[in-house]
Amino acid sequence: MIRRFTAGEPILTDAAVRQIPAESIAAFPYPHCRDGSRFSFTFPLEDGEIVYGLGEAPRGINKRGWLYKSFCSDDPFHTEDKHALYAAHNFLLHGGPLGGLGGIFRGIFIDFPAEIVWDIGYTRPEEAVITLDGTDFDIYLIEEETPRAVVREFRALIGKSYIPPFWAFGFLQSRWSYYNADAVKDVIRGYDEARIPLDGVCLDIDYMERYKNFTVNGEAFPDLRRFAAELKAQGIHLIPIIDAGVKKEDGYGVYEEGRDRGYFCKNADGSDFEGAVWPGIVGFPDFLRPEVREWFGEKYRVLTDLGIDGFWNDMNEPAIFYSAKGLKEAYEKAARLRGEELDLTGFFALKDAFARLDNSPDDYASMFHEIGGRPVNHLHVHNLYGASMTRAAGEFFEKEFGKEKVLLFSRASYIGAHRHGGIWFGDNHSWWQHILLCLRMLPSANMCGFLYCGADLGGFNGDATPDLLLRFLALGVFTPLMRNHSALGTRSQECFRFGDPAPFRDIIQVRYRLIPYLYQTFRRAAEAGDMMFRPLSFDYPDDPIARECETQLLLGEECMIAPVCEQNASGRTVYLPEEMCFVKLSGERIVSKEVLPKGLHYVRVALNEVPLFLKKGKTVPLCRPALRTAQLDTETSENLTW
Ligand code: GLC
């Protein structure tokens, strides 16, 4: 059962694809109040009740005990003290046998693109308080007997998830940056010589001419069309990055067109809002306008015409390093303080004047969009920005090439964008705890429709060690997007860089053996509006240990995954909610199969092994591995079963 409550005049987000008749907010069943320009509502949190949702967000699968914010944020430190990451996925699910809703489960979807604060037992452990920074919104409530049924109903509301081309289930290698065609060739050679499967190489910002979208640095990539074709013939796809901001430069066609047609976001006085990102000063296309989406989407043709069929959209929260106005104010503050005897307060004011320039609320507040011919402040629609960029690209690809032809994943997102592309979880670190963070985001993102997703394997920031990368990959074997990516200035972390490549080959070959199974599981989830990964508590609601499990996931109907997430550990403790077969896969081998009874077990897993737990009577097909998805004989060569 689904109900929609409308207050004021909500901004149209197109997140929902089904029309549900609107009821007045007066009928909204949670205690609620309007406090000036904000709306908030509360619900009690019962002992043992689990709160799921929020998609890509910090902390656990169970969101209780912390304060989260829906505000797409470019923050490269994904630590526990954070409230938001790059996405705004406004869906929550609670209730159940231990909840206060008479046993039923309830999904709450807040279709509202400005900031939302989700205090889920942070201020008062026994209460959730949700506060919207505005009073015009739609809230949908979905009630069902099981959490999975709530998710299915929600997904029917928001429409089917994006399905990428088959090759996008192959392994992808990325780095900021492979500076020229030779560097890309070296990477492919490295993988081929190590006989490690690979299907794509991502090109980071340096493939462009001075970071200008839809241009190619001709010195670094003298003939991208030929190069892309050469690689295609080898089964390798190039996946260039596109950033949200368009470099301000006279003579640069994309910029001039955007400026002349009035397509960039504006200041209050109607002039173009300008901020600095990688290219220097940029204009931010007003992706919320359909004509701007169409215009920007069409620009991808420059690259699709060269044979490119994969893209990642970045910096689309949008990230703003500084604005001309912010920088001017900082200089003015510095000038005022110059020569003064600074006390500590003065010193920190001076420091902060510069340290707080990036992604500043003041800049967002001085940026305007145009909706229905009227200016709308960016803060009212912030969370739609990246999603609308994804939509611009996705709609172009679908119109031009049909469904499932072009790979697309984005950094920022809002529910609705799941129909047009996937997401990656942004700039994580080469930290062990980030393996777990990735695992925990998978079911949450799945609930919100984002099925094609994954983290930067090996970690983006910081230096990876081979054991970390191997363990990260052993989780990445299961994530639809399986990409190794790392930042400028960090240790190289391609899989052949750490001496003996055999353990890496062993892990990535397992992925290729599983691709037909993973692809099928993914497709089923996409078509049925289901999740590919579920928390254990979804399937074992009465099992107290399963209910609290935050380090294992159910995958499809057949298995459970439980990666090793600690350094120097030769295994881990795993909880089996029922009798299962513990399988270790490595390269082309099934290393071992052992039926274990329900309960807690310590299982040993070597660095070159992928652990998998198979349910009784279930079968996971394995095919023979290959170096490319295109060479996979997707017929089953062996059935994993017991
Ligand atoms: C951002 C992206 C990262 C990319 C970098 C340079 O930090 O999140 O993936 O490598 O920009 O383009």
Image (cartoon, grey):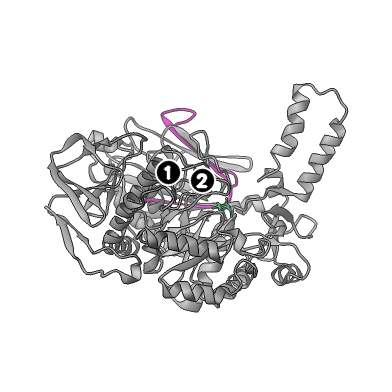
Q: Position of residue 378 (x, y in %)?
A: 66, 53
Q: Is residue 172 magenta?
A: no
Task: Please give the range of residues in magenta.
Answer: 114-142
Task: Answer whether labels 2 and 1 touch (C-beta < 8 Å).
Answer: no
Q: Position of residue 69 (x, y in %)?
A: 53, 41
Q: Amino acid at mark 2?
A: Arg
Q: Horizontal placement of 418 versus 602: left or right?
A: right
Which secondary structure lies at badge 1? loop
Q: Position of residue 56 (x, y in %)?
A: 46, 47
Please say whether residue 98 is visible from this viewpoint: no
- Residue 198 figure quarter: bottom left
Tell me which label, 2 or 1, sits earlier in the chain. 1
Q: Amino acid at mark 1?
A: Pro
Q: Which residue is mark 2?
A: 491
Nearer to the camera, 89 or 134: 89
Looking at the image, which residue is at 77% across and 54% down?
268
Which of label 2 and label 1 is nearer to you? Answer: 2
Q: Which residue is mark 1?
A: 29
